[in-house]
Image (cartoon, helix red, strand yellow):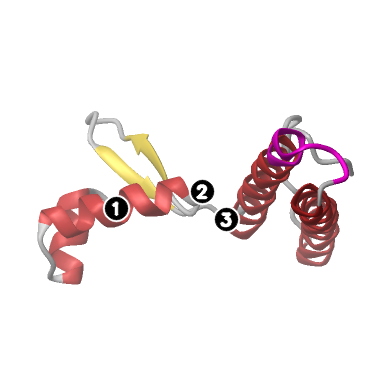
Amino acid sequence: MTASELVRRLQVSPASVSKSIAFLESQSLVRRERDERRRERYVIDEDLWYQSMLASARSLVQQVEISRQGAQVLGAGTPAAVRLENVARFLDFVAESITRSAEQAREILYSTSGTVAPTPDAEAVPGAQA
């Protein structure tokens, strides 16, 4: 749908649509496309939940990196650094698990529906190990 179609259908202000679309895009829940008349359309594709899970995993990977940087700043072996390293290890495990589970669920979804799964993004979750 276009922004004006969303405004009419949802009966909200254009500013509400704009702000909501920006948030949804930041969460990989919607994407923008141009139609043949060069109007911006907002699209929710059938790979939405897979992409959303990968975005969550990428966010966790960023938190892992920040935690490890904090542990280095605080100095190896200090109680705070040990806690931050434990946080990093935990979040790293969760990010890997989310990525692996999303890939498995996606395979199951497409194998039972008879459709072909879209090709996954080669760098879906930088830093996470699958």
Amino acid type of disc 1? Met
Identify the main secondary structure in magenta. helix
Image coordinates of residue 16 in percent, x first then y, are 18, 59
Residue 28 marker = 2
Q: Earlier in the sequence, mark 2 or mark 3?
A: 2
Residue found 76% across the figure and 34% down from its top:
72
Residue 48 marker = 3
Q: Secondary structure at mark 3?
A: helix
Q: Is residue 107 one of those drawn in magenta? A: no
Residue 119 visible in rendering: no
- Residue 81 falls left or right of residue 23: right
Image coordinates of residue 58 in percent, x first then y, are 66, 44
Q: Secondary structure at mark 2?
A: loop
Say above or below: 120 vs 11: above
- Which quarter of the image is occupied by the C terminus? top right
Q: Earlier in the sequence, mark 3 or mark 1?
A: 1
Q: Nearer the viewer, residue 110 or 86?
A: 86
Say above or below: 22 vs 72: below
Residue found 77% across the figure and 64% down from its top:
109
Residue found 21% across the figure and 56% down from its top:
17
Give me the C-alpha separation between circle 3 and circle 1.
16 Å
Q: Which residue is mark 1?
A: 1
Q: Nearer the viewer, residue 20 or 115?
A: 20
Say above or below: 107 vs 65: below
